[in-house]
Amino acid sequence: MKIKQQVKTYSPKASEIQRDWWIVDADGMTVGRMATEIARILRGKHKAIYSPHMDTGDHVIVINADKVRMTSNKAERELIHTHSGYPGGLTTRTYQQSLDRQPADTVRKSIVGMIPKNRLGRKQATKLKVYAGPDHPHAAQSPKPLEIPGARRELGKR
């Protein structure tokens, strides 16, 4: 009679989670391709200890959010709709108007929109810091540069 040995599923403990700080220079990057990679880092999917029910992700700093770009004329074509909740309270603007007015918020919303919409996702979103210019107050954390080669393309190339 052979006895089968059971393999236990590994679940990381909160004390085992090591959080790194990453910095992304968004100058010339495509918004969507950059946002998917940053959302992956925030969730912790790049780590071997990833668990969907725990926050195993790292901190990400995005600088130069005012210099991101969108492909194929989407900045003028795509619309952002917001509603105040009152009758007639619909406000519509293009991505270009939003990038001109609040570039950090526009980039933040595109990244946060790619993580889960629950308590865990809100906790993961607090580890994202977005700044419109090149300066940030997180130098003490000594962030490592994060390269996203698929997001940086030259204009005119496909």
Image (tube, helix red, strand yellow):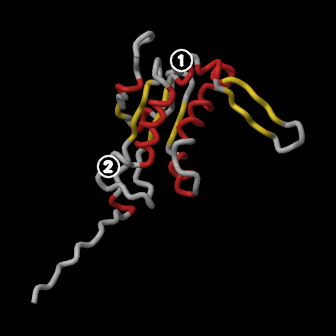
Residue at the image position 27 percent from the left and 72 percent from the top: 8
x and y percent of residue 73 in the render? Answer: 58, 16
x and y percent of residue 43 in the render? Answer: 44, 48
Query: Can you identify the residue that label 2 sits on?
Result: 47
When asked about the image quadrant of residue 148, the answer is top left
In this rendering, the answer to whether 24 lies above or below 9 is above
- Three-letter code, disc 2: Lys
Mark 2, secondary structure of its residue: loop
x and y percent of residue 10 in the render? Answer: 30, 66
In this rendering, the answer to whether 108 lies above or below 124 is above
Tell me: 154 left or right of 69.
Answer: left
Query: Can you identify the residue that label 1 sits on?
Result: 72
* Local crowd size for mark 1, using a 10 Å CA cut-off: few (<14), some (14–19), many (≥20): few
Residue located farthest toward the left when viewing the structure as drawn: 1
Residue located farthest toward the top when viewing the structure as drawn: 156
x and y percent of residue 20 in the render? Answer: 37, 43
- Foreground mark, 2 or 1, reads 1
When asked about the image quadrant of residue 145, the answer is top left
Q: Are marks 2 and 1 in contact (CB under 8 Å)?
A: no
* Local crowd size for mark 2, using a 10 Å CA cut-off: few (<14), some (14–19), many (≥20): some
Quarter of the rendering occupied by the C terminus? top left
Tell me: 24 left or right of 114.
Answer: left
Marked residue nearer the N-terminal end (2 or 1): 2
Residue at the image position 54 percent from the left and 24 percent from the top: 65
Residue at the image position 52 percent from the left and 56 percent from the top: 120
Residue at the image position 59 percent from the left and 29 percent from the top: 104
Residue closest to the eye, 70 or 68:
70
- Three-letter code, disc 1: Ser
